[in-house]
Amino acid sequence: MDAGEAQLDSIGALRRTHAAGEIRSEHVGQRVVLGGWIQRRRDHGGVVFVDLRDRGGLVQVVFKPDSSPECHARAGQLRSEYVVLVCGTVAPRSDETVNPKLPTGEVEVIADEIRLLNRATPAPFAIEAETDADESTRLRHRIHDLRRPPLQRALRLRHELYQATRASLAERDFLEIETPMLARSTPEGARDFLVPSRLQPGEFYALPQSPQIMKQLLMVAGFDRYFQIVRCFRDEDQRADRQLEFTQVDLEMSFVGVEDVLEVLEAVTVAGCAVSGVELPRPFPRMGYREAMDRFGCDRPDTRVQLELVDLSDAFAESGFRAFRSVVDAGGIVKCLPIHDADALSRGQIDKLESLVRKELGGKGLAWIRVDAEGGWQSPIAKFLSDAERAAIAERTDARPGSLIFFQADEPVRANAILSRLRLDLGERLGRVDGREWDVLFIEDFPLFEADDQGRPTYVHQPFVAPHDDDLELLESDPWRVRGTHYDVVLNGVELGSGSLRNHRSDLQRRIFELIGYSKQESEERFGFLLEALDAGAPPHGGFAFGFDRWAMVLAGASSLRDVIAFPKTQRGQDLLMDAPSEVSAGQLEELSLRVRRPRREG
Ligand code: ASP
């Protein structure tokens, strides 16, 4: 009979007794009812073998022509991904047929009844651990992709991470409170997603970039300890580790200082990581922002990589080597990444790195010095260096035969970003990593302000961060030197989240708005309700938000956020399964008092 014509059965009163993936030797002799999808069917000289798959795994089901001829005949109609209920008896496999790779591999189920509950269209790619389907095919056919074991595992891990963080916070007396999705624009530094209001034509809600202001209001309202596992929305250009909508474990506490918040963060991080069997060292090591930038060129260093950067800007302040000197004169830096015993890196590989720096990382180039076996310097720049400069480089980088030193002379942000990237790439490639599997860190003492494009102060984290108590006077005399009470948790070089104490007095909050360039009127218009709330008796408070997707990604050992989110968006912000975003009807636009000006199509 043609498979397409296979008769469908009703589930009737028949119910599963076990999960397919949980059948073991201890079930031998038991009659079981299993439900699931056909992974594979093989016909072996009359006997039909089927791998039945459910959430828990696979089990082999055997259909024999002699013992159950009717059931066996139907097995011939089964195709991949068909949905069935199977009744049968668990039997041991013979020694030769035991499959040690499968948790159920010591047993099989001898079927005596089968119900075909639904047919299935052919899968666009194999439902296997590995796939060579490209990402857009996977996202377009997300149902099939989600059936694959790594995604099944990742979403289970994600579930366990929700439960662990929730339990850990509830245990510490945090209340789970929801905040609105249809909200008002808040400044987290990204573009807002706007939702037009039908009832207030011409006005818009903003989807929250985070519940930051709401959680502060909850503290003023006396809830003391709040948390929420919450969706946030930021209309940013997509990078590999960003999604337009993402999940935070958001929390806030009253009557606390930095140490109290860090204690909670440490406990929650430990509880969350434990779902993957990860034991983190306590207390978490801490590092100042400045030190992290100086030594590693980034504020979320993976300290397992045993390479460090060296700043040489002062050595080139008076230099005759124009390429470096002019950068220092313009406020830039000269920094380098020394790597010892680097003979494994060939000239060809250095050239490739140079092209990576220029083409992908936005650098001007990649100067280098290689110290040969006799101590000679092979280098395109050595001839421009004075003796004093050579001596400074040799001493500070501890240069010796076999050393290779890469230089960046650029504005600090770019020079650090490039060297930090090379540090990670080369550290891994050359095996310069210590043996720790997990590296957790608190980063603290961030500056409160950084310079914007025009060189004016803007906030580093967000405008509500309280300055460090000891630096309050500097707000007037030297704002650039004011430290914020901002802290980050970093896990294996990934920023798990950020937080800070907040300004709970309106005078201080107003002063900070002023320093970052908001006029009085602007502050009132955008944040009047917050300032008013602070005046209504705000307690000192502070909090944090974990980037939940990233955390799940690190624990799952995944390389993309898309592998730990059920229905993620592409780099271009599209949902390929539902085909969103999409056009809406003229009637819907009319109701919202909107008119769309279509971008002119090219060509
Ligand atoms: N609201 C902040 C963010 O989303 C986190 C915090 O400071 O609590 O980054």
Image (cartoon, grey):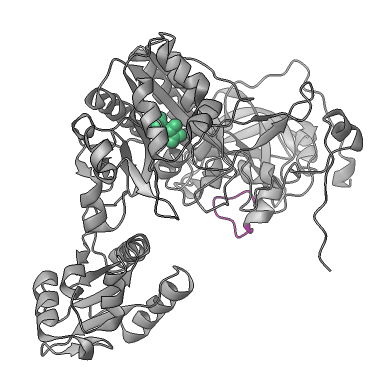
Residues in magenta?
126-134
Asked if 290 appears above or below 496 in the picture, the reply is below
Q: Nearer the viewer, residue 355 or 311?
A: 311
Q: Quadrant of residue 566?
A: top right
Quarter of the image for the C terminus: give it: bottom right
Residue at the location (44% across, 9% down)?
A: 221
Task: Tell how many labels.
Answer: 0
Residue at the location (73% across, 44% down)?
A: 577
Q: Position of residue 243 (x, y in %)?
A: 56, 44
Q: Position of residue 35 (x, y in %)?
A: 66, 29
Look at the image and say whether residue 122 sits in the magenta stretch: no
Asked if 368 appears above or below 52 in the picture, the reply is below
Look at the image and say whether residue 129 sits in the magenta stretch: yes
Quarter of the image for the N terminus: give it: top right
Q: Nearer the viewer, residue 175 or 38?
A: 175
Q: Position of residue 11 (x, y in %)?
A: 77, 22
- Regarding residue 336, the answer to whether it shows in the image is yes
Q: Left or right of 252: which side holds 111?
A: right
Asked if 316 appears above or below 58 in the picture, the reply is below
Q: Nearer the viewer, residue 379 or 11?
A: 379
Q: Quadrant of residue 412?
A: bottom left
Q: Nearer the viewer, residue 339 or 123?
A: 339
Q: Left or right of 271: which side holds 445?
A: left
Q: Quadrant of ligand 1?
A: top left
Q: Left or right of 61: which side holds 325?
A: left
- Regarding residue 544, the answer to whether it shows in the image is no
Q: Position of residue 410 (x, y in %)?
A: 34, 69
Residue at the location (47% across, 27% down)?
A: 212
Asked if 579 appears above or below 375 in the picture, the reply is above
Q: Main secondary structure of the magenta part?
A: loop
